Structures are given as C-alpha cells and as structure tokens.
Image (cartoon, rainbow, N blue to C red):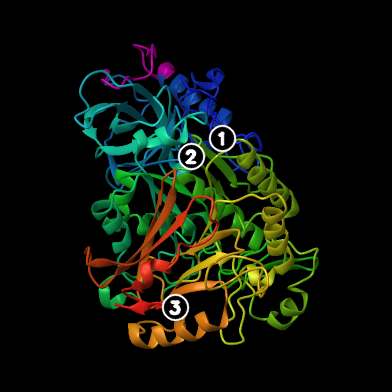
Amino acid sequence: MFSKRGSHISLYVVLYGLTSCVSSNPVDRNLAYRSPFTDKPHLGYDTRYIHARHAKRQLELEIEDAGGFVDEHYPTWYGADFSNSPFVYDGGINFTHGVASGDPFDTSVLLWTRAAPDGTQLPDQSVPVCVSYGIWDNPELSGKPVNMGEAFTSYDVDFTLKVEATGLEPDSKYWYQFADCTNPKTISVVGATRTLASPDTPAEKVNGGKPLTFAVFSCSNFPFGFFNAYTFAALNTTSDIFVHLGDYIYEYANDVYGNGTSIGRILSDRELATISDYRTRMALYRTDTGLLTAHQNHPWITVWDDHEVADNTWKAGSADSNDTSLGCQYSPSETCFTDRKLNAVRVYHEWMPIRQVVADDKLRIWRNFEIGQLMDLTMLDTRQYDRDLTDDYWNTDFVNTVSSFPNRSIMGFEQENWFLGTLKNSSERKATWRVVGQQIVFSQLNETGVFDLDAWDGYRANRLRVLDFLYNNSIGNTVILSGDSHANWVSDLAIPNDTTTYNSSTGEGAIGVEFAGTAVSSPSPFGQFIAPGPADDISTEIVNLNPDLQWSEASYRGFFTLEVAVSNVTATFYAMRNLNTSNTDGFASAKFIVHSGQNRLARPVAGGSVLAGALRNGTHA
C-alpha cells in the first residue's frame, strides 16, 4: 500500500516512506510513531512493542469472552461491524484540530489529523484508536478513492495520525477525509492538497504552465495576535503550497514574552520543557482559525527555527539552557537542553505533516524537492542540526570576536557540503530556479553599528563560502527565503561591502536575491506596535547603511508570496492591519520581480514605489 517512491527528492537525501513489509501493521502506518528516530526505539517509539501490546490486549479479551473473538480484517474506509471488537476503541472520537497535509512528492503526500477520544475518560493504553482515510480527485469525494487505508493512533503520540497517501498522479490536486473506523459517520472536515511535478517535467509544463505560487511564513506568536496572515493567504491569494520557515510556536511562559490576556490568547505559566508542555502548546496554536484554515486548504513544507525548542538554540544549548562538560545549566523549567530538544522534536514530528529524513542522523530535516525542471526547493536547518555557538545574550562580546572564524558553521559541515552539492546538482540538471528556504537573514545587516550575531552575520565565513561557491560555479537564479527577524528585508545577494564588483544602483554583479519576510504575529524588532512612520524612518537609515539592501519594512505583520514562472520570479509582500480580532484586513505592500538570468532585483526595484517601508531610490505611495 505504501511506497518509497518520491523521485523528486534529491539524490543527496533519502526521505523515509513505508515499505510493504510493514503495511500489515496499522501502527506502522501512522508515521507519527516513527519519529523522531525510526530505528532507535530508545529515542522514539518501538512500534513492535505497541503492536504487541494491542495484540496482547486482544488475546486477553478473547480468553475472557466465552464466545471468542476473531479479528478477520482491520476496518475499511466504508466501515465494518465492530460491535464485538473491544480491542479497538469504539467510544467515539473528535477530530479536534482539523486536518493537514504536507511534504508532497510527485506520487504521494502526507495526510495528518488528530483523533481524540470523546469525553474525559481516555481509553486504556492497550486499546488503539482506529482511523480510516481516503483521498479523491474531486472535492465532492465522489467515486472510489484514489487511495485509502486505516491506521492506529494512541496516547503514545497524543492521538495524532500521519499517513502517506500513495499512487497519486503528479502535479495534481486532491481532496481527503478521515473517519472513525468504528463509526464511519464520524468524519473530519475535507482537506485539499496536491502533488508536485515529476523531476523531468519540462519547466514550462509545471503546474499546467501557470506560475507555481508559494505563501511564505515565519514567527507566529500566539499572545501577540491572531494569525490573520494564514487566513489571508488561504482565502485571498492563489497560493499552491505554504512554506513555513520556523517559529511555528514559541516556548515562552505567559508574561515572559507577550501577554495575550486582552485578546483572550493566554499561555501556560511555565516555559515549555516536557513532552506534555510542547504537546499542549501545539494543540493551543492549532485552535487559531486562520491556522486551521491554512492547513486544511494547502499542503505545507516546513522547517523549524529556534522557538520550536527554545530561544537562540545551537547544537548544545539555548539562551537559558545549555549542556556543558560539567553538566547542565537548567532552564526555568528545570530541564536540560538535550531533554527539551528531544521532547520538542518528537512533538514537532507528531503534529506536523513533515516526512522523517535519515533517522540515525541527529535531527536532520534538511531536504530538497525537485519540482520539475522549473525549480529546486531546498530546505535548510540553520538552527538545530549542528550549529556552532551563537549569541545567547550572556556571550555577545565573545561571539563577536569569533564571528569571522573560518571553522564556524551555521549548519554543520555535513549539511553545508550537502547544500553546496545540491546547488551544483540543481544547476547541472538545468533546473531554472534554485529557491532556498531557511531560517535567518542571510545578507549582512548593519543596523546602525549593530549586527545580529544570531543570524548569518555571526557566521561570516560560512556565508562567504556559500557566496563564493555560487560565483565560482556560475550558479545563477538563486533565491534565498528567510524569516526570524520579524521584519521585511529585500536584498541583492553579493559579497558584503564589495562595492567594486557589485553596483547597488543597477544590481550588476549580484549572484541572486534574498526575500526575508516579517512575522505572522511576533512583534517588530523596532518596537512592539511601532507605527509605520517611525518604523520607516529607522528602515531608511538601515537601507542607507547597507549597499545590498533595497527595501526594509518593520511596522506591519504579515507574509509574502513567491510566484515562480520560467521567465521570472515575483515576490509580493502582504501587510495585516489588525491582529486583535480574526479578520482578513490586509493589503499588498510591495512587489518585486527577478528576471531569469539576471541574478538581481529588476530595476526600478518594486516598480519604483511601495505602499509601506523604505525603498532605495524609490518612493512611498
């Protein structure tokens, strides 16, 4: 039933699918059990044990029941009589957090839901919850499903369910739904998703010849406002795929970083540390109607940033919890960083429609999608994987002294070598565009003498290695996507401070572009609730200090779309006016075009005019 196929994934990375040998085990069909380390049961879930636990429960019930019970088959999408089947929970379920899909391949996609038992009485841990699913090629769900199946979930994975729908057609739209195996009348909402074009699809034929559009998000912070950017993107744009660059949740306790009491968005009173903490926070975020709508209507491709675990993470610590040779410096939650990290990663894989990458390779989620010959979408992890020491506030001066050291890496040298190889492979296979999704601002940002050492400015040699590789190998049409900073920054990609090779006015000498987006709701770095006028004054000063930077805007919260066509890429930035209620009150603040082969923003940048922010050599309409 399940397949390993997914040929659009780069040869440099293998994403796990389920093999036919486990398809008979409905526990293994639920990919949430297989994370975060598929073949390391002591770090994840031993599905053989869980399956045996369910079987033991069934055997005990058979012995107790004089009439006996024979399990002839697992339930089908169309239902079965489970009146005499006590080994499957039949007390009713609720699909409490909608549906979601993600990590589409050319012939498969992941489908997600949460099937929470009804009422306050949870089933015995030995009793699994059975959920069936089907996927159709029409929104009415008429006719036979293209793919269907059943899978188990349980308290072990917070009753989440993540399955792979296979046998799909490339570059096609689909609709899916979940149901309670024991009561097929209990169904989830209908979700919409799609597959990607096969790698060998000619660029001009991808997406039926229409531009492929991505909605790009980062930094959604619950107490700071409603997630209206998700709603706006889902309902008011023609986006095909949603890309999230991280900070999907925040780990802070209430009042530590934002108090949402006035708008009814209140957090727990402890910083996240345990697996229960992270699950509760994920569940809370998934109550936002905008987020539910966005997941229901589009497939997502995601990476984490730091706050999915803790603030300013690196490979051995964070701002308030670090593992050292002498032991652990405890966080306010009294949990070591490594423990927090493993808990957070496990919950992330339970709740997000993301595929597991190489299971015995630390925390690897970096991966590459080959979307026809139109583009490669490369997703990096510049936070959790193998990042060297970052600015954790107490060590700012030290990190500044080592920020240019050549042995520092923001992603670990294994990932860095993979990334450069992926760029080269993309160029050699003649993909038109290379789009790189990653967390933090890549270009140098001199903010009136201050540099963000937690971004690429704290890893200058690593940044230079990437730029040199692009220049030396003549790899063009590269677009870097960034989040994290809670502000909008649009730049040509060039060697920092190189005004000889790079011409800031014309863009000549650049090797690509960067689109860095603002936050869904997290506050501006220029000050929470800062008005457009004062924010634009600061942006103007920063634009004047940075030759590569062409536009800066930091008052509005929002997102941007990236429309990828053969001849050009267009980025449109959207601003939300009001986060105090759930609404779609927003507008397009700026639009930028990159023509194929030019490796720079088209001039005049943004057509010479924007509706918000500071534009170099442009006007504010």
The magenta-colored residue range is 62-81
Q: Are marks 1 and 3 in contact (CB under 8 Å)?
A: no
* Residue type at the position of mark 1: Ile
Of circles 2 and 3, which is in front? Answer: 3
The count of marks equals 3
Number of the label disc, if any, that sits on residue 617: 3
Question: Does the magenta run of residues contain 441?
Answer: no
* Residue type at the position of mark 3: Asn
Of residues 46 and 135, which is closer to you in this image? 135
Q: CA distance from mark 2 to mark 1?
A: 14 Å
Q: Position of residue 228 (x, y in %)?
A: 29, 63
The image quarter in which residue 573 lies: bottom left
Does any portion of residue 285 appear in the rendered image? Answer: yes
Q: Residue at x 70, y 68 (%)?
A: 459
Q: Earlier in the sequence, mark 2 or mark 1?
A: 1
Q: Are marks 2 and 1 in contact (CB under 8 Å)?
A: no
Instruction: Answer left or right for 21 relative to 361.
Output: left
The image quarter in which residue 26 lies: top left
Question: Mark 3 packing: few (<14 Cα in 10 Å), some, or many (20+)?
Answer: few
Of residues 148 and 152, which is closer to you in this image? 148
Q: CA distance from mark 2 to mark 3?
A: 32 Å
Q: Secondary structure at mark 3?
A: loop
Residue underneath mark 1: 9
Residue underneath mark 2: 374
Q: Are marks 2 and 3 in contact (CB under 8 Å)?
A: no
Q: Residue at x 22, y 63 (%)?
A: 584
Q: Position of residue 254 (x, y in %)?
A: 41, 74
* Residue type at the position of mark 2: Leu
Q: Position of residue 606 (x, y in %)?
A: 39, 67
Of residues 30 and 295, which is closer to you in this image? 295
